[in-house]
Amino acid sequence: MYNYLKNCKIIIGVFIIWPFFSLATSHGAELSGSFKTPISLTGIIEPAIILKVQSSVGGRVEVLHVKENQHVPKNQLLLTLNNDTQKRQLELTLLQHKVNENNVIDRKRQLKLANVQIKVDENNVKDRKNQLEVSRNNVKDLEASLKDILRRLKDEETLFEQGSSTRSQLEVLQLQYFRGEIALKNSILGLERAILNVDNTILSLERSREDIKGSEISVENALIAVERSRHDVELSEDALEDTLIKAKIGGIITAKSFQEGEVITAGAVLFQIIDIKQVEIKIQLGEGDLPMISEGQAVVFTTPGYRDIEFSGIIERISWTADPETGRFPLYVKAANPGLKLRAGMSAKVYLLRQK
């Protein structure tokens, strides 16, 4: 009887132990590949990129173009500061720049006229020198002719004294000589005028050359003035642009710190723009967990709001120093945010993926 009861106990024990053995074996097969190991119970989800929007100038907020929690693309105009002064300054600098550009046109036109004038003066010098050469030849011809008449007149006077010539013949030569003297004097006067004309045209040519130098300098100065006014226009445009606050990244407007009509100071933080397309989870990691993790390692995480969804990420960086308050090591997980389900401030439970 005792042996019978002993055998029954063994059989019952086998039946009782077998289901637990089967369950353990089944569970072990389920985790034989990749499995999840908790890294930390909770972490806080934050945007991967948070941009503080600041103004480089102070002024009154004229128009607010966006609302808090609004999604804005890159370069979206967010607000406009009162910019009446900047607009007037830009108008003045544009006007001055236009005046300077017109001045360059005028100076170049004057330089062109001066170049034309110098060509005219150079031709005038050539003409006057030619006229001078003609006048000199005329004087030489008249001097030779008068010398010949004088020689014949002396011969005629000798013949007249000898009675071999008549008074009328003598008077004809005397008249020729008198007319020749007058012609020579007039030709000499013409030669002097020709010399004076050459001198005057040469002087005019020198003045034209000086005018060209002055015109060239005027053009250079006018071009310098244009460059300066162009720079002034760029500065005025930048000053006006500074009153137009735009989004440097695409994202969601948060943390608005002012109202329309309010006067803000230069450097004041006006908004935050968060790019939630990627998120970052900060986790406080215990020292004992450090050996089982590394940067670039894959993780999955869940949130209380989406318990049935596992999100994927990677360990982006691990701090080399512990937090002095907690004694734990900050770890940062970076993850995509498909469908923008994840929001800043959500809690997350993160699991490390590793091979057994």
Image (cartoon, rainbow, N blue to C red):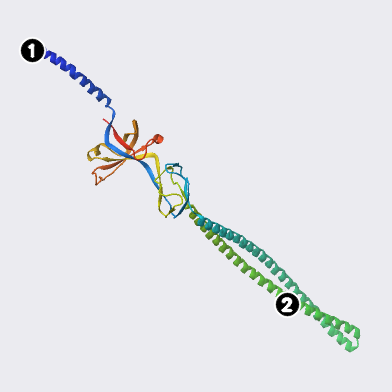
Q: Position of residue 189 (x, y in %)?
A: 75, 78
Q: Position of residue 122 (x, y in %)?
A: 67, 67
Lower position in the chain sequence, tag 2 or tag 1: 1
Considering only vertical position in the picture, is 128 above or below 150?
A: above
In the rendered image, the quadrant that contains the C terminus is top left
Q: Secondary structure at mark 1?
A: helix
The residue under label 2 is 192
Q: In the image, what residue type sits under mark 1?
A: Tyr
The residue under label 1 is 2
Q: Is residue 165 visible?
A: no
Q: Position of residue 339 (x, y in %)?
A: 41, 34
Q: Dividing the picture into quarters, in which one does residue 103 lie?
A: bottom right
Q: Secondary structure at mark 2?
A: helix
Considering only vertical position in the picture, is 130 above or below 325?
A: below
Q: Position of residue 354 (x, y in %)?
A: 28, 32
Label 1: few (<14), some (14–19) or many (≥20) C-alpha neighbours in 10 Å: few
**Residue farthest to the left, as pictured:** 2
Q: In the image, what residue type sits under mark 2?
A: Glu
In the rendered image, the quadrant that contains the N terminus is top left
Q: State left or right for residue 15 relative to residue 344.
A: left
Considering only vertical position in the picture, is 30 above or below 169?
A: above
Q: State left or right for residue 10 relative to residue 134.
A: left
Of badges 2 and 1, nearer the viewer stands 1
Q: CA distance from mark 2 to mark 1?
A: 168 Å
Q: Which mark is residue 183?
A: none
**Residue farthest to the bottom, as pictured:** 161
